Amino acid sequence: MKFFVDSANVEKIKELNELGLVDGVTTNPSIIAKEGKPFKEVVQEICNIVKGPVSAEVTELDCDGMLSEARDIATWADNIVVKIPMTEEGLKAVSILSKENIKTNVTLIFSVAQGLLAAKVGATYISPFIGRLDDVGATGVELIERLKKVLTNYQFDTEIICASIRTNQHLELCAEAGGHIATIPDSLFGALSKHPLTDVGIKNFMKDWENYKALV
Ligand code: E4P
């Protein structure tokens, strides 16, 4: 499973990248806004740090607007992926962009039908949001299982980016379901390596080692 960082925080991306955990980055307008820097500047900075795909989202909502924004964003770096919202206008734009070999990530996917349509018009990636589905009482990970099955049934090349991951369990379930990629908030990475029994185990090993050293 590939790991993307769901963040535009350059320092945190650098740190995780140095650990060897980063295969790519996803951003959205809310994530970019948090950094308070010019959009293009922060995206280019990220693209210089990370070799893998970096998603940057359009903010125009009509097809023509999305196309001109997407064509511009695509020139910012070689590893750019243009993120397009899942709407009819978005699908039209993705269909055209895929013929121009511009990589796309169709975002805000909440159903199998939406994912299937996006794959059919040539999306490079689709981003189903599992945490937000959980927020409204659904079981987000079921969407990953179903989309994986459908994309496999028809041998689409489109990859699933499991998005809106909020917990360790979300990540584990997405991996079990065969999601190609997990995009993980930078704040969650720290928690992923932890387990209380690991801490207890280390403490006990160290105590026993000290006792042993006092004897020999
Ligand atoms: C990633 O592409 C999404 O923008 C992100 O995972 C959304 O996460 P959230 O639902 O926690 O805001």
Image (tube, rainbow, N blue to C red):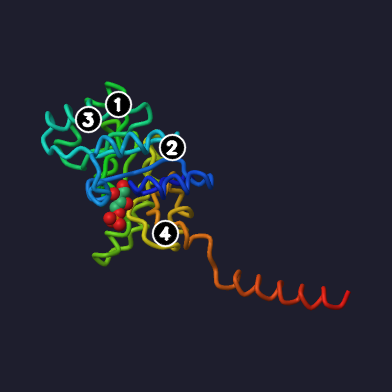
- Tag 3 near tag 2, CB within 8 Å: no
- Mark 1 CB lies closer than 8 A to ligand 1: no
Of badges 3 and 1, the one in the foreground is 3
Q: In the picture, residue 185 is in which quadrant? A: bottom left
Q: From this viewpoint, is residue 128 visible?
A: no
Q: For mark 1, what is the residue?
A: 102
Closest to the observer, 81 or 176: 81
Q: For mark 3, what is the residue?
A: 70
Task: Mark 3 or mark 4: name the one nearer the start of the chain.
Answer: 3
Residue type beneath disc 2? Val
Q: Secondary structure at mark 4?
A: helix
Residue 50's disc number: 2
Q: From this viewpoint, is residue 153 visible?
A: yes
- Tag 4 near tag 1, CB within 8 Å: no
Residue type beneath disc 1? Ile
Left or right: where does residue 169 sit relative to residue 114? right
Q: Position of residue 135 (x, y in %)?
A: 26, 65
Give the CA distance from mark 3 to mark 4.
30 Å
Give the CA distance from mark 3 to mark 1.
8 Å
Give the CA distance from mark 1 to mark 2.
19 Å
The quadrant of the image that shows the C terminus is bottom right
Task: Mark 1 or mark 2: name the one nearer the start of the chain.
Answer: 2
Task: Mark 3 or mark 1: name the one nearer the start of the chain.
Answer: 3
Closest to the observer, 21 or 8: 8
Residue type beneath disc 3? Ala
- Mark 3 CB lies closer than 8 A to ligand 1: no
Q: Secondary structure at mark 2?
A: loop
Q: Secondary structure at mark 1?
A: loop
- Tag 1 near tag 2, CB within 8 Å: no
- Tag 3 near tag 1, CB within 8 Å: yes
